[in-house]
């Protein structure tokens, strides 16, 4: 099963992708997490990506597409995956479609987690992220057992550099201009599913499970 998570920054793509990954045994592939791991490790890719991420802009397609295609070519992705944060532009979606078509394959579901802009800023300021394993928490809505420490792997949690309110505003603008058109793109392909992302995260997950069932 190949699933794409669509939605604005902070809509809950990562949260839901992780839950899908656990329930269905699919790898959770997040381009944002791959970039953040590279930034943490000081790689050239990380240095390049950071310039764009800190400004709330998208990392150029050439760079992003390559790392994504390399990642999904790995063995653990053979039976499917959940893509979180990719594609984010029409050209990225076209590259993915082409790569899948060459393998005689296709995207099964594009799930749009719908959350209006007004709810987003509040979610971002309370988010805490684990750069080691990619887990996501929220100080109010999804707290850890020990403050500041990842429940899953014990690493220290960070506040993402791009979660400052000014940067979030830019990210939302970029989302509406460059990423939102993907909703229509996948609708035309007949694989779009919409879920209300404003309700409790377990309720959002129940809606997703009923779509995938
Ligand atoms: P990325 O890491 O993908 O960030 P994003 O799309 O902006 O989305 P977020 O991770 O911020 O939000 P999310 O939807 O995953 O929400 P989450 O589950 O954390 O990308 C970062 C940057 O990398 C981009 O800006 C770009 O520069 C670059 N990049 C990445 N991919 C790229 C690509 N393909 N092309 C080009 N550039 C790329 O939830 C948010 C918070 O809300 C959490 O604290 C969570 O606990 C909480 N929450 C979740 N669900 C609920 C709920 N139902 N109720 C209450 N709280 C909730
Ligand atoms: Mg995320």
Image: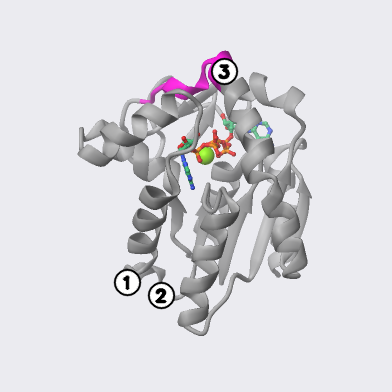
How many other residues sit within 10 Å of disc 1, few (<14), some (14-19) or many (≥20)? few
Q: Residue at x 63, y 27 (%)?
A: 141
Residue 78 is marked as 2
Looking at the picture, tell me which residue is in the foreground, 22 or 102.
102
Q: Inspect this view and state whether residue 157 appears.
A: yes
Secondary structure state at the residue bearing disc 3: helix
Quarter of the rendering containing residue 3: bottom right
Residue contact between numbered discs 3 and 1, judged by CB atoms under 8 Å: no
Quarter of the rendering containing residue 198: top right
Is residue 163 one of those drawn in magenta?
A: yes
What are the residue bounds of the magenta stretch? Answer: 157-167
Secondary structure state at the residue bearing disc 1: helix
The quadrant of the image that shows the C terminus is bottom right
Residue contact between numbered discs 1 and 2, judged by CB atoms under 8 Å: yes
Q: Position of residue 72 (x, y in %)?
A: 39, 65
Residue 125 is marked as 3
Is residue 136 one of those drawn in magenta?
A: no
Q: Residue at x 68, y 40 (%)?
A: 201
Residue 193 is marked as none
Q: Position of residue 177 (x, y in %)?
A: 67, 38
- Name the residue carrying label 1: 75
Q: Inspect this view and state whether residue 134 appears.
A: no
Q: Position of residue 106 (x, y in %)?
A: 57, 75
Q: Residue at x 53, y 80 (%)?
A: 105
Q: Position of residue 120 (x, y in %)?
A: 67, 26
Looking at the picture, tell me which residue is in the foreground, 13 or 174.
174
């Amino acid at each position: 099963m190949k699933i794409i998570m669509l939605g604005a920054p902070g809509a809950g793509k990562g949260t839901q992708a992780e839950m899908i990954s656990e329930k269905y045994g699919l790898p959770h592939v997040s381009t944002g997490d791959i970039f953040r791991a590279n930034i943490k490790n000081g790689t050239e890719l990380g240095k390049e990506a950071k310039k764009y991420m800190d400004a709330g802009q998208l990392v150029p397609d050439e760079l992003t597409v390559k790392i994504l295609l390399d990642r999904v070519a790995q063995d653990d992705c053979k039976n499917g995956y959940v893509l979180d944060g990719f594609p984010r532009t029409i050209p990225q979606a076209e590259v993915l479609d082409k790569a899948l078509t060459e393998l005689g394959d296709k995207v099964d579901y594009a799930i749009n987690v719908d959350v209006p802009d007004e709810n987003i800023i509040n979610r971002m300021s309370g988010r805490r992220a684990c750069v080691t394993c990619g887990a996501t928490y929220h100080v109010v809505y999804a707290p850890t057992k020990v403050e500041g420490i990842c429940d899953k792997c014990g690493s220290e949690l960070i506040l993402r550099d791009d979660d400052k309110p000014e940067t979030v505003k830019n990210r939302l603008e970029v989302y509406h201009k460059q990423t939102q058109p993907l909703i229509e793109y996948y609708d035309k392909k007949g694989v779009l599913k919409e879920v209300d992302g404003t309700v409790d995260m377990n309720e959002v997950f129940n809606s997703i499970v009923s779509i995938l069932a």
